[in-house]
Every structure is written in structure tokens, then in C-alpha cells.
Amino acid sequence: MAIQTATSGNLETISNIVLAKTRYTAESAAPCKNLIEHFTLGSGQKQLTIPKSGSISFDNLTDGVDIADSKDLSISTTDLTTGEVGGKFIITDKLAKQFNEDVFSMIGRLAGDAQARKVDKDIIALFAALNGGTSLGASGNPFGLTQAFGVAAHAQSNMFPNPVYIVQHPIPLMQLNKSGAAVGATYYAGIIGENEDLLRRFFGIQINGVNMFWDANIVVDGSSDAVGAIFSKNAMAFLESKDWGVERERDASLRAWEVVYVADYGVFEIDDTYGAPMTYAAAALATTT
């Protein structure tokens, strides 16, 4: 009887195909990671401590009179740590023997989607706690031009550091686009920076200098509402200790190889005052006249 065994060279080729497709898909599958701060834990580091200083003000001075008051920086810190995330595929000897590049590209695409979706949902889970948990908008409220200018004004009046973004479910943004089209709102105002190509496909509209992006990973709740957020890039952070990597392990009794994906990262709220959740209606739009 012929023995079907995947050679290490064959497994290496398979793994390279899967990894290449995974990385490409993960980089272009979800917007949130590209809109927040990124930090990396160095070798031997257990956590990263982020300092924040309160604001200070200067006083009027009188000629010849010494400055009497010193300013307190009021520094506070936030400690960030990471945790492991991962999963595995089983590649049987039979599948590897039949080696089909399309099949392994599909596996890579699925892995990339899973990675991107996991990170994206972790960041979305932070939205509700921004602004002390006080949401802009309300259940059942449509997201139109008036509301869009209102949330942009909230960011500007509370001095969110630039750049400022809105991330919301596609349906509220489509409602906004419908109302914005009538008055010539900007549909692509340019996203400057290294992530421009990755973010372009998620871009919805720009209002008052705030770029807005759709994200289908935001859940529509039982009241047909979606909770997105407006936030400064400085409001949240992605901390990475280990990028997504892959290891192979032989399972002889299964006649297969386990391909294991593991990353070590965390997502965090850095400054509660630099963002706010946004609750708006997300009932399905009419698809008939």
C-alpha cells in the first residue's frame, strides 16, 4: 500500500502560501487597528507604562516680581499588558499530498479574516466605555448631517487631538451618505499616512474634517441600534508583544500536521476623554421602491 506522507519541504511550501495569504488578508480586512496608537513590548518587558500629564496654565507676570507659583504636571500612568490569542488548522497527509495552492490560499484567507476580526472586535469592545460610558446619539436616532456635525463639534469643543475618526456600522453611514449627497458632502478627502491604501476601502465620508469609516464587525443590537465611536488616534492603543506567527507540529496518529497560529497583544483605552461612543439607528435600509 502506498504511504501518503507530507514531506517537510512540501509543508514548508504550504505554510508559506498560507502565511502570505493570511498576512495580506489580515492587513486589509478591518479598519480599527489602523486608526489607533501602536506600541511594541521590547524583549524581556512584561508591561508598558504610558504616562499622561494634566494641562497647565500660565499666569500674567509683573515686571520685576519673581514668579511665585510652580506648575504641577499631575502625571498619571496606564499600565498595558498583553495576552496570547491563537488557533490551529489540521492539514492531513492526504490533503498535503494532493497539494492544491488554491486550497491553501483559502486557508490563509480564512486565517487572515479571523485574525483581523478578532483584533477589530477587541477594539470595538472599548467603544462603549469612552467618555465615561456616556454615548452621543440615542436609541432609534438616525445618523444624518445634523448628528454628524454634532458629534464632530463634540470632538472639537472637547479638544480631541488630531487626527479624529468616526467608526460606525455601514447602515448609519449609508444614511448619512444619502443625506450628505444632496448638499455635496466630501466623499474622499484623502487619508494621509502609511495606512491610506488599507483604509481607503472603508472610507465613508468626511464631515468637518473628521474622516468616517464603516465597520461591519459592529453589532446591530436587538433594538436595531449600532454603537460606533468618535475618537482621537490617542484615545486607544494596540500593544504587541509578538506578531502572528505559525508553528507546525506532527500528529502521527492523526496522520496530519497541526498548523498553529499564535499572537500576543492587547488593546486598551488610553484616554477616556479623547473619545465617545455613538448610538444610532441601524435598521436595514429599503431595498425596494
Image: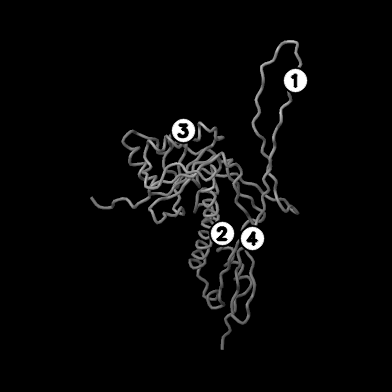
* Mark earlier in primary sequence (4, 3): 4
For the residues bearing labels 1 and 2, Cβ distance under 8 angstroms: no
Residue at the (69%, 15%) spot, across then down: 61
CA distance separating discs 2 and 3:
42 Å
* Mark earlier in primary sequence (1, 4): 1
| Closer mark to the observer between disc 1 and disc 4 | 1
Colour basis:
one colour
- Mark 4 neighbour density, 10 Å: few (under 14) some (14–19) many (20 or more): few
CA distance separating discs 1 and 2:
62 Å
Identify residue for label 4: 84
Identify residue for label 2: 20
Q: Amino acid at mark 3?
A: Ala
* Mark earlier in primary sequence (1, 2): 2
Q: Position of residue 120 (x, y in %)?
A: 52, 53
- Secondary element under disc 4, as helix, strand or loop, is strand
Q: Amino acid at mark 4?
A: Glu
- Secondary element under disc 2, as helix, strand or loop, is helix
Specify the quadrant that holds the N terminus: bottom right
| Closer mark to the observer between disc 4 and disc 2 | 4
Q: Position of residue 109 (x, y in %)?
A: 50, 61
- Mark 1 neighbour density, 10 Å: few (under 14) some (14–19) many (20 or more): few
Q: Position of residue 119 (x, y in %)?
A: 55, 55
Q: Nearer the viewer, residue 123 or 57?
A: 57
CA distance separating discs 4 and 2:
21 Å
For residue 194, which numbered disc appears in the image? none
Residue at the (74%, 52%) spot, across then down: 45
> In this image, 237 relative to 75: left or right?
left
Identify residue for label 3: 153
* Mark earlier in primary sequence (4, 2): 2
